[in-house]
């Protein structure tokens, strides 16, 4: 399988709080996922998550301080592995 998708977010961090990305990924097969976070203020953060399924993986990623998340993109390099990938995620801004 080939996983490539993104989620967009509103420009809503008026107090310049620090963002974190929380994700839960369920691999029914294998996965080597690149996660790219784009900010409204410019710039990106990139993370990699690798697991052999079936498994659930929960991660928190500390993003760039005071920036606002515009988009989170996922790309799974393990397209030759049978199975599916399910993703739940949230953006948390905290002071």
Image (tube, rainbow, N blue to C red):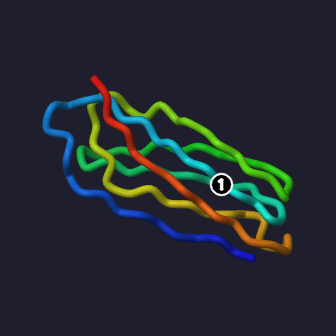
Residue position for label 1: 25
Q: Callout 1: few (<14), some (14-19), or many (20+) C-alpha neighbours within 10 Å? A: some
Q: Position of residue 58 (x, y in %)?
A: 64, 42
- The residue nearer to you, when weighing 82 against 65, is 82
In terms of image quadrants, where is residue 93? Answer: top left
Which quadrant holds the C terminus? top left
Q: Position of residue 49 (x, y in %)?
A: 69, 47
| Residue visible at 28% across and 37% down in the picture | 67
Dot 1: what SS? strand
| Residue visible at 76% across and 60% down in the picture | 27
In terms of image quadrants, where is residue 63? Answer: top left
Q: Is residue 69 left or right of residue 73?
A: left
Q: Position of residue 30 (x, y in %)?
A: 82, 61
Q: Is residue 71 left or right of residue 95?
A: right
| Residue visible at 80% across and 53% down in the picture | 55
- Count the labels in the image: 1
Which residue in the rendered view is the most extreme toward the top? 95
Which residue in the rendered view is the most extreme toward the left? 14
The vertical placement of 59 against 81, above or below, is above
The vertical placement of 4 against 44, above or below, is below
Q: Is residue 5 left or right of residue 78?
A: left
Q: Position of residue 6 (x, y in %)?
A: 46, 66
Which quadrant holds the N terminus? bottom right
| Residue visible at 43% across and 36% down in the picture | 20
The vertical placement of 6 against 93, above or below, is below
């Amino acid at each position: 399988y080939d996983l490539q998708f993104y989620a967009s977010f509103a420009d809503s961090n008026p107090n310049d709080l620090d963002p974190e990305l929380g994700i839960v990924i369920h691999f029914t097969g294998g996965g080597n996922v690149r996660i790219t976070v784009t900010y409204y203020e410019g710039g990106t953060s990139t993370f990699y998550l690798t697991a052999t399924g079936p498994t659930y993986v929960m991660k928190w990623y500390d993003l760039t301080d005071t920036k606002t998340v515009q988009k989170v993109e996922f790309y799974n390099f393990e397209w030759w592995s049978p199975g599916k990938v399910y993703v739940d995620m949230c953006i948390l801004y905290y002071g």
